Amino acid sequence: MKQDSFIYYTLHLADNALILGHRNSEWCGHGPVLEQDIAITNISLDLIGQARNFYQYAAKLMNKQNAPSPNGKEVGGEFTEDKLAYLRDVREFKNCLLAEQPNGDWAQTILRQFFFSTYQFYLYRQLQESHPDEQLAAIAAKSLKEVTYHLRWSSEWVIRLGDGTEESRKRMLNALENLWPYTGELFVPAAYETDRMDLKNIKEQWAQKVKDIFSEATLPYPAEGWMHTGGKTGMHTEQLGFILAELQFMQRAYPNSEW
Amino acid sequence: MPLQDLEKIFQDKIDAEIKIEPKDWMPEAYRKTNIRQISQHAHSEIVGMLPEGNWITRAPSLKRKAILLAKVQDEAGHGLYLYSAAETLGTSREQTINDLHSGKAKYSSIFNYPTLTWADIGAIGWLVDGAAILNQVMLCRTSYGPYARAMVRICKEESFHQRQGFEILWVLSKGTREQKAMCQDAINRWWWPSLMMFGPHDSESTNSEQSMLWKIKRKSNDELRQNFVDMIAEQVKVLGMKLPDDKLKWNEQTRHYDFGEINWDEFWNVVKGNGPCNKERLEARKKAWEEGKWVREAAAAYAEKRKPQTPKGALEAA
Amino acid sequence: MNYLKKFYYGDIPEDKGGSNELKDSSKVSSSGGASDWPLWEVFIRSKQGLDHKHAGSLHAADAQMAIENARDVYTRRMEGVSIWVVESKYIHASNPDEAKSLYEPAEDKIYRHPTFYDLPDEVKHM
């Protein structure tokens, strides 16, 4: 049981990185300026890389355990990163709702990235420092370097847009209204993450960082308010189904093939 | 100094393989030809992101997804290097991009064809990038310094592009019946358009002669096309696939492959804007640019507010 | 606000055959419109101990962004460990017309090069 919950947790980390990386990858070729097209794609590549590390590790654990898949469905053969990414359905994905929210305009993408990178930054730091599983701590340590840059990049853009023109500020406020209700879930522990992670501590650091950057961006820090939850346990917004329809199309249409 | 002397000094330099640099005197037509060619090349990289880009979200494995994303991102980088090279000749990036959006500037017609299946991503890497690389390797020795330097960097980075394309097809060619069919179908659809990438026959190419004299181009369209056919006709055997040309045949005398005639009606039609995706491609670029306007303005406004500003670490930089 | 574009130093005076057209186009393009960010030159140190070397250019709204863009654009393949950026308009360049007077005088100072000196073969390590 304990091992199951550890596998779930690893999948949760992987799903977060994959879904956000996938969302960011939708920008490739459509960015507001060439230099930033390249920048957001770099972040996307980092996230997909993180997802692969977590999936590979989860697959290894699952194979070792020789257990049926966590959702009790037979996938055939050994677990691989691709089977975990491409053959699970919406209810089995454990990413936070924030990651699957649509790109919207550049302001919404930036703010989503900033919220998420701040979260990942403190989360990975805690994982690296205190998680007893060496492999997970090692993946977190590697990812932390990437996330440190994502956080810096997205913070600067939040400030630029918040304190840029009237229009950019308006768009940031709009993005804030859309995304804020999805930030609460980051800190509501799912059953599989209660034992080791101190989410309360992460939440405090997250709030402080967001307050600091918002104050520089002249953006208001919203009241806590009503928060959506459920992503961590597979209760997603309708967005995820469409993401998976696209993401998984090839593996579903041509099962059991090498690519 | 009289104009004809300047022209002589200029041509002597070219003949002596001395690169022309931005500040050097150059004939206006040389400048214009370079601007036209470099910006066309830049636009091709940027528009070229779209047909492949639309498979990023559907790539069949995480590994392929990462590779494709990195590859399409490289194209953005290459566009950027080339826009910068064009800027050394007196055109701003914004102006160059406006010319693309208004339809005044062209880009490679190949990107007006649709990517229908995953195998198309392989075919583009193998055939389209393969054709582009022949052209680009030649351009590493082009006479205008900033263009040549951009091309050296691009060629270095491009080397994985063609290989990843071939590898995609290679895996398909060993796969299921459906995958093999997908592979052959993509080759059928991309073969002729990639031959068209080299442009019209030498006898009909208006810009070629002067460009050769100025060493902007160093090989003719037909020469490069023949190199390409010779190369691909061999590689396709490894895949166990066929090129869709009955006339393709090794010629002992010329030591080259003979091949059939290109459908030039199709070529000119696509150039004129009647290709399957001309409209979508241009619309997508315009949309990105227009929707990015407020972003660019906001960043500029913010930078203006914070001026003068010394970046952290600048003082101890040296 | 008038950004001098990079081509300022590649510009050809009319009396030397540069056309009017360029002047016209430069008027349009050097308006420094808010949506065309200034151009920056990027210099990259490829590893500790080496000089920064010119890598290319890019557009950015400010210095911070220029450094980050340079990181994203020019170091995707581990090409660097340190980055300098400078706005292109601050680069001053020597004039190629003066190349003769600037660089040729060094040509006959061959005694500045070690190979100029003829030493007996027995002398080692010099």
Image (tube, rainbow, N blue to C red):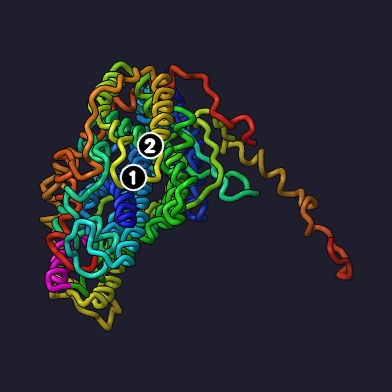
The chain identifier of the residue carrying mark 2 reads A
**Which is nearer the eye, A52 or A3?**
A3
Tell me the amino acid under the disc marked 1.
Answer: Glu
**Residue B299's spot in the image, x, y percent?**
38, 25
Q: CA distance from mark 2 to mark 1?
A: 9 Å
**A239 to the left or right of A36:** left
- Tell me whether marks 2 and 1 sit on the same chain: yes
Magenta stretch mostly in which secondary structure? Answer: helix
Residue placed furthest toward the bottom: B252
The residue at the point 34 percent across, 43 percent down is A194
From what the image shows, is residue B89 above or below residue B269? Answer: above
Quadrant assignment, res C117? bottom right
Q: Residue at x 41, y 35 (%)?
A: A202
Mark linked to residue B70: none
Q: Under tag 1, what secondary structure?
A: helix
* Place of residue A67 in the rendered image (x, y in percent of width and height, measured from the top left): 26, 64
Asked if residue A70 is among those painted magenta in the image, a careful observer would answer no
Residue A11 place in picture, x, y as percent? 30, 52
Kind of residue at badge 2? Leu
First reached walking from the N terminus: tag 2 or tag 1: 1
Q: Which residues are magenta?
A: B176-200
Q: Mark 2–mark 1 contact, CB under 8 Å?
A: yes
For mark 1, name the chain: A
Say which residue appears at 49% left-offset and 43% top-offset. Answer: B21
Instruction: Locate residue A87: give its quadrant.
Output: bottom left
Side of B18 where B96 appears, left or right: left
- What residue is pinned by disc 2? A199
| Residue in front for this viewpoint, B171 or B15 | B171
Q: Residues within 10 Å of mark 1 (few under 14, many from 20)?
A: some
Return the residue at label 1.
A193
